[in-house]
Image: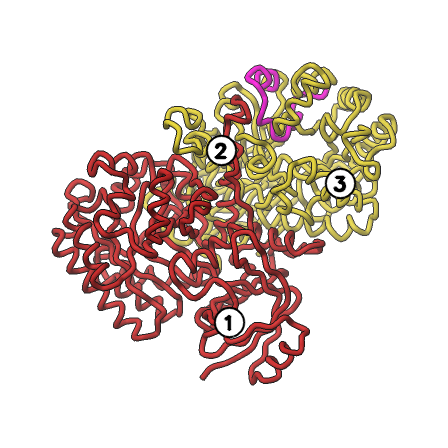
Chain colours: A red, B yellow
Amino acid sequence: MSSFTVEADRFQTPTPDHLEAGRVVIAVVDGEITGVERAGTEAARALAEASADHRVLGDNQVLTPGFIDLHLHAPQWQQNGTALDLPLDEWLFTYTFPLEASFADRAVAEAVYPDLVATLLGHGTTTAAYLSSVHDEATAILAETCVAQGQRAFVGRVAMDHPTGTPDFYRDHDAVSGIDASRRSITDIAAIDAGRGLVRPIITPRFAPACTDEMLAGLGRLAEETGTLVQTHCSESDWEHNYAFERFGTSDTEALDAFGLLREHTLLAHANHVRPSDIDLIAERGAVIAHCPISNAYFANAVLPLPDALARGARVGLATDIGAGVRVGVFQQIHDAVTFSRIRQDGVDARKDPDARGVPDAAIDTVTGFWLATAGAAEAAGLPVGLLEPGRRFDAVVFDLDAPGGVIRHLALDDEARRFEKLVRLAGPHDIAEVWVDGVSVHRR
Amino acid sequence: MSSFTVEADRFQTPTPDHLEAGRVVIAVVDGEITGVERAGTEAARALAEASADHRVLGDNQVLTPGFIDLHLHAPQWQQNGTALDLPLDEWLFTYTFPLEASFADRAVAEAVYPDLVATLLGHGTTTAAYLSSVHDEATAILAETCVAQGQRAFVGRVAMDHPTGTPDFYRDHDAVSGIDASRRSITDIAAIDAGRGLVRPIITPRFAPACTDEMLAGLGRLAEETGTLVQTHCSESDWEHNYAFERFGTSDTEALDAFGLLREHTLLAHANHVRPSDIDLIAERGAVIAHCPISNAYFANAVLPLPDALARGARVGLATDIGAGVRVGVFQQIHDAVTFSRIRQDGVDARKDPDARGVPDAAIDTVTGFWLATAGAAEAAGLPVGLLEPGRRFDAVVFDLDAPGGVIRHLALDDEARRFEKLVRLAGPHDIAEVWVDGVSVHRR
């Protein structure tokens, strides 16, 4: 049994509008948080005294929950942040699909994935929902890498068989073989995780345009049969949104539902163009919008109606959408999500009347943004993390406010809310001193 | 005489739409670039052989011009990136003015400014146009700090005397004393620079709402009399834009012009709400729009019509607007400028028809963004930097593509344009190996 206690200044957000700040003592046994007490109390002293391994973080450090990236493409790591000016289909066919296809060679996966996972851990991403490629071997290597480095992850073998929505050189031979491979990957990944509960399979129809009806329906049945989580893209752009109406006669959301893919905790990347009725359906099914701020700025033609989605009861979490991610850590996209929501509210064109320029009440603040990357994302994905409180797993990040070359050190600020805002907006990977997943230290600067 | 040559892979942008990439040998004598030759040529070999101090950068490093920040508030350094959700006037009166007022104590300036200047140099900002506070001493300390650390800078003692636009505890006693103090600061800063040509004074009426007519007119006369550059804010938000019409019966731009402040190289921060006729006037006078992407997202209620401003012949450069800057280095705001221009083009609200959503042809790419922070800003401010070519001063940044913890190392990309895009979007201060100003190494990681 591994157990320790840690005393630290903690920031966490139990709800989208509530920041909890203050010094606490946290007890961890075999990766689970078994107790949290306010520092300075008798109960906190008792926790610390009963501990054989008591650690105390300094005033210049802050402890937060680990950050959860609900959507990223592992085999796009090398191209991250490039060619973003292109239209999505050109970006995919010219750059992305050839790059993903190269993961047929296991040596490519062995070279790239350890670097990707280590880099994400170093950025504070303690949980990642990965789309892999169509390849069994590369997908297994990604899962093995997560286990080896101790990152909590969903790993999804991508299914894509549509004859016009995918290129000749990179697709499943047909729906049956794609469904079979998806089924195999569920077993493979369970074997790789070996009961740790750290790395889980996730059924991954790429997106409707890349999949035949047979594939979509088969994967829906596979999800039902195995109880495996699902991830895909939904109504990302005008093009994808309209495509669904043309092909299915319904919205993308409704089509996914009809194929049995809109399930509890299904991760829907983007969803910028969903209608209010789609949001209601997403909320009803308990599915999740994985909000990708930077990627959406380039490929989505609109900014997600975030407060509206939350008000309608939809689950929402944050995501990087690497390789369209630019900012590698989902923590770093919190500021972007906040900023873009503000641009959505204020609008872009000064020639228009202020009232006609933007969308009222569209802005979120850094507290909501932080929640989207921690407690909100954890609830969305059904994971017992996202808050440092009893009964959850200890996934946590230690920020060093005085890191060499850092810019968050001027925290001679008078209240916790401003300290928090400064941390969220300004901290980068070099300000992260240590990262914990499941009670294990997985990264130290 | 100090002289050296350096061989390196160089990225630079002579125009907003042209990236120059390739390996060169650059000769520097007493801070001036005296020769540039393509590596591998006979002329390059001759340059290197004639050099007593020849340096060769590796394939994993890139040399670029230094970056120019055309607008930031030095005494707001401690609050950078905080309370951005507030309306501008509340942000100013609750947080900013009290903080700036604390620089009446020279000990505050001595504690803060060396950290600010060192941090900016570490982020690759080789030139900064600073607004200081109203204080003679603190302003002198800022100028001395720039000289001591070797940063190229404009340092402007802020003038502000309006009885309602400024708080009791932080303003010039009256216009005459503000103009006198501005005049003194010109002499003081010239003495501190002592002929180096590195640090220059700049006349700084804060913005129209903070200054009486007498102050604005007096500073206009001071600029004309002394030939000193001017900086101020212009049509930042709906509020500031409308304020000018109410007070002056003209636009902010026209009012500044009437007071003699719209001069060659006058730096106008923000200018998001300027009308086409204002842009034409700015272009005619040779004045400059200092574009502050992140700050504008919070305080400006609109996104600058950047391609339109450039097409109309206005000078434009990039700026951080610290303390509303978040990203400390102007280099890091290039990606933001590009992203926000894309959001301006595509619009924000999916419920609107795509054609009615945004503003056509509003997007810029990373090449234009880079130009705005280098060659464009240099031309805008009238400085012989911004390109690594003969006759210019050697202000330069060395990026390390394999820096520890960096994310730009996957440059196994097939063309220079994508390598460049990845560098611009993803590089952070920890990827900067060395910074040069005026031929002197001023920062090494």
Q: Is residue B230 magenta?
A: no
**Circle 2: is it few (<14), some (14-19), or many (20+) Cα within 10 Å?**
some
Find numbered disc 1 in the image and state the secondary structure of the residue it sits on: loop
Judge whether A409 appears above or below B177 on screen: below
Mark 2: which amino acid? Val
Judge by depth and name the residue closer to the eye, B88 or B48: B88
The residue under label 2 is A359
Q: Give amino acid for label 1.
A: Pro
Identify the mark nearer the N-term, 1 or 2: 2
Judged left or right of residue A72, residue A176 is left
Q: Which residues are magenta?
A: B261-282
Q: Is there any visible trace of residue B389 in the rendered image?
A: no
Tag 2 subunit? A
Q: Is residue A269 visible?
A: yes
Work out whether residue A98 or residue A347 is closer to the camera in this orientation and state it.
A347
Letter of the chain that mark 1 sits on in the rendering: A
Q: Position of residue A428 (x, y in %)?
A: 53, 55
Residue occupying image coordinates x 31% and y 39%: A88
In the picture of the structure, the residue carrying the numbered disc 3 is: B97
Name the image quarter holding residue B356: top left
Name the one closer to the observer, B290 or B367: B290
Give the image location of residue A167, x and y in percent: 19, 44
**Mark number displayed over residue A390:** 1
Residue type at mark 3 is Phe
Secondary structure of the residue carrying numbered label 2 = loop
Residue at image x 59%, y 60%? A20
In this picture, residue A67 sits left or right of residue B264:
left
